[in-house]
Image (cartoon, rainbow, N blue to C red):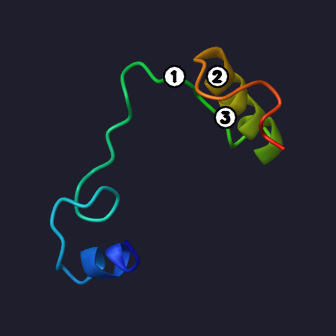
Amino acid sequence: MKGLYRKAFAGELKNFTGVNDPYEPPLNPEVVADTEHETAEACAAQVIARLEELGLIRAGSEQ
């Protein structure tokens, strides 16, 4: 997987999101982290809380 951005910038990979294919935000995201106004820790806590709500991780497993 290493070197994908290098290949995309070199034109070796087409339709690579963020390089030669536009990013399209999801219409109904599971989590919206306001990284401009919240700390990285607060944003990570939002993601972890949502993963717990979805049953994808157990509470307290972020240790």
Which residue is identified by label 3?
34
Q: Nearer the viewer, residue 2 or 9?
A: 2
Which residue is at a point 72% across and 26% down the rendered structure image? 58
| Disc sitting over residue 50 in the figure | 2
Which of 59 and 37 lies nearest the eye of the viewer? Answer: 59
Dot 2 lies on which element?
Answer: helix
**Residue 4, x across and y down, in percent:** 33, 74
Indicate the amino acid at tag 3: Asp
User: Disc 3 and disc 1: Cα gap in Å?
Assistant: 13 Å
Three-letter residue code for mark 1: Glu
Disc 1: CA contacts within 10 A as few (<14), some (14-19) or many (>=20): few
- Which of pointers 3 and 2 lies earlier in the amino acid sequence? 3
Q: Position of residue 32 (x, y in %)?
A: 58, 28
Answer above or below: position of 9 versus 42.
below
At a point 73% along the width and 37% down the height, the residue shown is 43
Quick one: label 3, few (<14), some, or many (20+) residues within 10 Å? few
Give whichever of 14, 38 is nearer the camera. 14
Residue 9 percent across, percent down from the top left: 29, 78
Q: Amino acid at mark 2?
A: Arg
**For residue 27, above or below residue 22:** above
Relative to 58, is 9 above or below? below
